[in-house]
Image (spheres, rainbow, N blue to C red):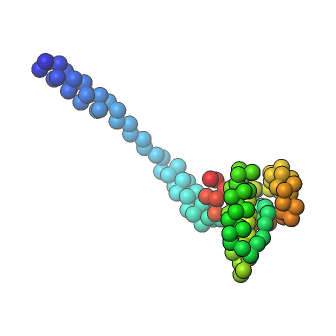
Amino acid sequence: MKYTFAFLLCIQFFGVQAQVVRITMDKEVEQQIGDFNRNQANTSTIQVYRIQFGVTSDRREMETELSNFKNDFKIKTDWNQKGPYYYMKAGAYRTKLESFPDMQAIQARYSGAIYLVESVKKQFVLK
């Protein structure tokens, strides 16, 4: 029993030591990655096409409509308020062509749907 325990302890000790990996980065590569990260931090928003599918002055109606939209289309939505109106928007597309199939489906139900060009955070597009 003692020998088995000692043997297992030795195997565990040597197994842990064998798993060490060291990676060193070239100075030039490190500088390029740093430049890229600084550039990305400076440009935190990008221009995208969004689909505005509704405007209402009633918050409850807006929340109900957003819920119905999410159930029907499975597209990322959000809303904002300007004055007394709530604007409901969907998607974030790099080009109009990319958004065209979704726009056709949305216009079948929401005839007043329009394109908007907005600046959004990159995280919104990537999620």
Q: Is residue 94 above or below residue 79?
A: above
Residue at left offset 83%, top offset 51%: 105
Left or right, 17 with respect to 25, comes to left
Left or right, 62 with respect to 7, comes to right
Foreground residue, 48 or 89?
Answer: 89
Foreground residue, 49 or 76?
Answer: 76
Q: Name the quarter where the N terminus is drawn.
A: top left
Q: Is residue 3 above or below residue 115?
A: above
Left or right, 2 with respect to 54, comes to left
Residue at left offset 71%, top offset 67%: 62
Asked whether the viewer can see residue 91, the reply is: no
Q: Is residue 127 above or below residue 14?
A: below
Q: Position of residue 37 (x, y in %)?
A: 55, 58
Foreground residue, 82 or 17?
Answer: 82
Q: Is residue 94 above or below residue 19?
A: below
Number of marks in the rendered image: 0
Left or right, 33 with respect to 8, comes to right
Q: Position of residue 75 (x, y in %)?
A: 71, 53
Residue at left offset 64%, top offset 59%: 124
Q: Position of residue 103 (x, y in %)?
A: 83, 55
Considering every residue shown, the one lying at the far bottom of the view is 83
Q: Position of residue 25 (x, y in %)?
A: 46, 46
